[in-house]
Image (cartoon, rainbow, N blue to C red):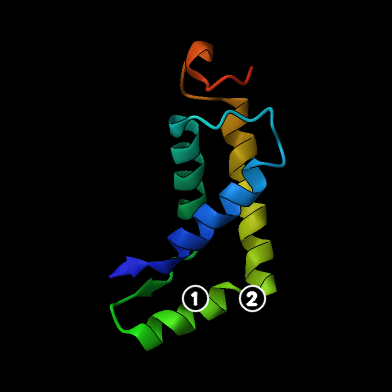
Amino acid sequence: MLNALEEAVRDTYETLRSTDPSFCGCARCQEDVLTMAMNQAHPRYVVGDPLGSAVTRVALARRQLQAELSVIVLDAIRRVAAAPRHPKEVDGGASH
């Protein structure tokens, strides 16, 4: 069993991360953003059944859900950028 939404949140993060070069992309900030976003989004669990998994992935590809995920991930990026949980020297090159 896995939460199919995790893949969609990660994809959304990767897309949006590149739009703001000032945001720290270190592993700690990335995990903080993904955790925050996953906690805000409604989970979509699937089992190994290929049909069920495919149906869930199609539902996750809908524009409305993509827009909702973008809002959630952007909010998480802004919140993490405002209060990163690491020293500035470890931030992957971006300044905070």
**Where is residue 25, by image quadrant?**
top right
Q: Can see residue 40?
A: no
Query: Which of the two residues, 74 or 11, is positioned nearer the viewer here?
Result: 11
Query: For mark 2, does the 10 Å Cα neighbourhood hold few (<14), some (14 to 19), or many (20 or more) residues?
Result: few
Residue drawn at the location 55% of the way across and 72% of the way down:
60
Residue drawn at the location 69% of the way across and 31% of the way down:
21
Residue identifier under label 2: 62
Residue 92 lies, in percent from the top left, at: 53, 22
Q: Which mark is residue 57?
A: 1
**Where is residue 76, by image quadrant?**
top right
Q: Amino acid at mark 1?
A: Arg
Residue extending furthest toward the right: 19
Query: For mark 1, does the 10 Å Cα neighbourhood hold few (<14), some (14 to 19), or many (20 or more) residues?
Result: some
Secondary structure beneath dot 2 equals loop
How many numbered badges does the structure rendering display? Answer: 2
Residue 87 lies, in percent from the top left, at: 48, 14
Looking at the rendered image, the quarter that the N terminus falls into is bottom left
Say above or below: 61 vs 7: below
Residue extending furthest toward the bottom: 51
Q: Is 1 placed left or right of 71 in the picture?
A: left
Q: Is 70 placed left or right of 41 in the picture?
A: right
